[in-house]
């Protein structure tokens, strides 16, 4: 069975990884919104409506990063609950 790499990291490393991943997601998200807006604009102006699904569906590429961030948050939360008990 595959080992959980997050369990091997310290809490400080998890926090640093969370901060880095969150910053990358915010940066890429902003760039993605701008690019999708531009594609949407081009689709409407040029009446090329085939670009509309591309402009709205490209956010799926951020899904693995969001899942990774959720896993990091869950690991941090589980460690905090261990220390509270």
Image (spheres, helix red, strand yellow):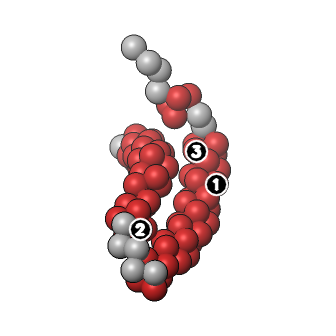
Label 2 element class: helix
Point out the image quarter for the N terminus. Answer: top left
User: From mark 1 to mark 3, how far is it between C-alphas?
Assistant: 10 Å
**Lower position in the chain sequence, tag 1 or tag 3:** 3
Q: Is residue 39 left or right of residue 15?
A: left
x then y, percent, for residue 25: 55, 60
Residue 82 percent location from the top left of the image: 40, 40
**Viewport quadrant of the C terminus:** top left
Q: CA distance from mark 3 to mark 2?
A: 39 Å
Q: Which residue is mark 2?
A: 51
Q: Quote the CA–CA distance across marks 1 and 2.
A: 32 Å
SS of the residue under disc 3: helix
Q: Foreground: 1 or 26?
A: 26
Q: Are marks 1 and 2 in contact (CB under 8 Å)?
A: no
| Dot label at residue 20 | 1
Mark number for residue 14? 3
Q: Residues within 10 Å of mark 2 (few under 14, many from 20)?
A: some
Please provide percent x and percent y for residue 81.
38, 46
């Amino acid at each position: 069975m595959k080992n959980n790499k997050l369990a091997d990291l310290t809490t400080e490393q998890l926090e640093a990884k969370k901060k880095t991943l969150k910053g990358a997601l915010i940066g890429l998200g902003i760039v993605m919104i701008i690019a999708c807006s531009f594609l949407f604009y081009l689709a409407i102006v040029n009446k090329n409506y085939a670009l509309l699904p591309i402009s709205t569906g490209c956010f799926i590429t951020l899904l693995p990063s969001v899942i990774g961030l959720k896993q990091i948050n869950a690991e941090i939360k589980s460690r905090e609950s261990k220390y509270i008990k």
